[in-house]
Image: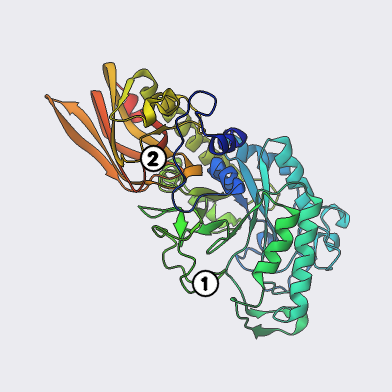
Amino acid sequence: MRFMNCIAATLAAIALGPTAAADDVTPPAPHGPVPTDRQLAWHEMEFYGFVHFTVNTFTDREWGNGDESPDVFNPTDFDAGQIARTARRAGMAGLILTAKHHDGFCLWPSKYTEHSVKHSPWKHGKGDVVREMADACKAEGLKFGIYLSPWDRNHAEYGRPAYIEYYRNQARELATQYGPLFAVWFDGANGGDGYYGGARETRRIDNRTYYDWPNTWAILRKLQPMACFFSDAGPDFRWVGNESGIAGDPCWATLDLTRPGRHPGGTSEGLNSGERPGTAWIPAECDVSIRPGWFYHAAEDAKVKTPDQLLDIYFKSVGRGASLNLNLPPDRRGRIAEPDVKSLNGFRAILDATFARDLARTARLTASNVRGGSDAYAPANLVDGKRATYWATDDAVKAAELILDFDAPATFDVISLREFLPLGQRIESFALDRWADGAWHEFARGTSVGSRRLLRVPAVTTGRVRLRLGADACPALAELGLYASPAAARP
């Protein structure tokens, strides 16, 4: 499911209304918080990757102390192209690189520190991992993002005002030297014991105020206006509250920013499910590693998640309206290891087989109500493959039904739904019924839809399907798909 490049069409649709050139039917008004342009672009990606790579790869640790010598960073056969190709073939839309982890070692030759690749033996100190990854992503058609750890266990000034100037200078370097960024990732690991320039002490900070996040974000926003910023509570997309890749059910795209602790490193309450109605559009990202750890460890070669495990995570992240950020840690060569590649390829094969054919496109669709009786809002929009078109009802109609009639019984076990996001998250509940023995029989139900809702059900064979919706405002549904997974497609 590579993301479709239809942002311009989507934005035109909300600005002008999909019927502006065809008739005078007014489009629905936005309801509640709505996504920004950059958030819409991020939503379309759905699935991308993390690349955890630093001195930890060579010390066999997850968190470095900050006193590691640059000499330890020496990949024997670094291949950014292999990493990017592996991600693309897995169906990812982008990669986020750990440009600097908590240990403070920089994967680019920053002019603001000596603790970087410029003092490593790799390429005799002339290498730049960030540059090579950015170029490789561009060559493979992937978007590129960076992780810049707020915590720095190496820097002597961490915990003091001078470090904030240092951090912002490095953010400027990354935001101006490596092309467009789709994401800048900030986590909540802040303060503790470290090397700190030789002090070897414990330093604590107030994570609500120390980083002065509004001004730090403002600098990056000016330099990278389409980059989405991640932290526990946004400001553009949020942590899902765990590192297992599992979103809540429901998982609303909105969050209440008036709740205390809504800052990087703050409370995780409400992050897994979101909050309804919420005060801001801050959808969830599910971050999880393909291995038990975030960095490569040879001892975990036999513990790589299987294709079926990755599939389960996909349905419980992307399939619940979140994005999936799957970590692919390069090994000491500087490549994605063979067990990881094999599992990713198997996972991709299952997804491709599952979504190869949308059975809903073979059905006749009829709706209980169509907005203004206009073809511009007709149910046919659900099966045209475009996110910028949608089926909508009249404003007063907040409960609606759609029936799919097949010429011959169809068998499926996967359902896909999408809302038209520029109008907000409107649907509160949905249910699906099959026709059998002269009556309707419910086989699935749920609450949130949002960016995407995927449901796996026991195989259903029927000649008619009914979708029932309940909404806070007239529903605006952009997609309804019915698919057969390889198991369901077998005779």
What residue is shown at x 63% (from left), y 77% (from top)? 209
- Is disc 2 surrounded by few (<14), some (14 to 19) or many (20+) residues within 10 Å? many
Residue position marked by numbered label 2 in the rendering: 454
Question: On screen, 193 above or below 68?
Answer: below
Vertical position of residue 277 compared to residue 27: above or below: below
Type of amino acid at the residue the image marks with label 1: Gly
Which secondary structure, mark 1? loop
Q: Nearer the viewer, residue 385 or 483?
A: 385
Side of 429 where 277 appears, left or right: right
Location of the C terminus by quadrant is: top left
List the single residue furthest toward the top: 407
Asked if residue 163 lies left or right of residue 402, the reply is right
Question: Residue 208, position in %: x, y?
Answer: 59, 76
Find residue 277 and report its image quarter.
Answer: bottom left
Q: Which residue is mark 1?
A: 266
Give, as a three-letter code, the residue at label 2.
Leu
- Residue visible at 46% across and 45% down in the picture: 318
Q: Is residue 389 left or right of residue 186?
A: left
Image vertical order of residue 159 relative to residue 58, above or below: below
Q: Position of residue 50 (x, y in %)?
A: 60, 51
Residue with the most extreme left position: 437
Horizontal and vertical percent for residue 82?
68, 40
> Gap in Å between the C-alphas at discs 2 and 1?
30 Å
Of callouts 2 and 1, which one flags the residue occurring earlier in the amino acid sequence?
Answer: 1
Residue at 49 percent of width and 52 percent of height: 303
Q: Secondary structure at mark 2?
A: strand
Please name whichever residue, 198 or 399, is drawn nearer the observer in this view of the structure: 399
Q: Are marks 2 and 1 in contact (CB under 8 Å)?
A: no
Report if residue 339 is visible in the image.
no
